[in-house]
Image: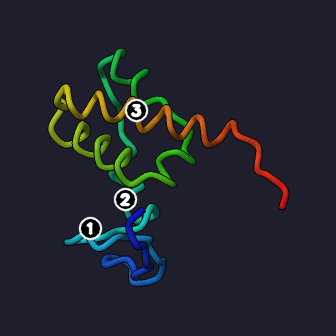
Amino acid sequence: MAIQFKIKCMRCKKNYVIVTHRMHGFVQCYDCEKGQLEGEIKDKAMRAFFDLPEEFYRDNRFLRSVKIQYMRFGSITEKQREFFVKAAEQMRKRSTEAPQDI
């Protein structure tokens, strides 16, 4: 697993964001990206596709970026769909697993 560290959000300068050495550029926290996630999706199939719990979007930056790209451009590639489904399934598995007592 890659080394992770926290940096402050480049937009609000209040919240910390967990990043890796590969994540370059303009890093934003969930609260700053939340406005871009809100909006109406007209296509019923895509509305169902993006219908995930808010905690999934809060915890996974990739899910947020794919939804923001769809909201901005109106479509996503097949590879983005494929990996979005994989990431959502991993999040579902994590949320259903009970925390182990130590």
Mark 2–mark 3 contact, CB under 8 Å? Answer: no
Mark 2 and mark 1: Cα distance apart in space: 16 Å
**Location of mark 2 (residue):** 33
* Label 2 SS: helix
* Label 1 SS: loop
Residue type at tag 2: Glu
Of label 2 and label 1, which has the lower sequence position?
1
Residue type at tag 1: Met
**Location of mark 1 (residue):** 23
Q: Position of residue 91 (x, y in %)?
A: 53, 40
The residue at the point 34 percent across, 68 percent down is 28
Examine the rendered structure and indicate whether residue 9 appears above or below residue 54.
below
Mark 2 and mark 3: Cα distance apart in space: 22 Å
Examine the rendered structure and indicate whether residue 50 appears above or below residue 15.
above
Residue type at tag 3: Lys
Q: Residue most toward the top?
A: 45
Examine the rendered structure and indicate whether residue 6 appears above or below residue 32.
below
Q: Position of residue 9 (x, y in %)?
A: 37, 77
**Location of mark 3 (residue):** 86
Mark 3 and mark 1: Cα distance apart in space: 20 Å
Write down the quadrant of residue 18 in the picture.
bottom left
Mark 2–mark 1 contact, CB under 8 Å? Answer: no
Which of label 2 and label 1 is nearer to you? 1
The residue at the point 46 percent across, 35 percent down is 88
- Say which quadrant the N terminus sits in: bottom left
Is 99 situated left or right of 53 in this image? right
Residue closest to the eye, 101 or 85: 101
Q: Position of residue 43 (x, y in %)?
A: 30, 19
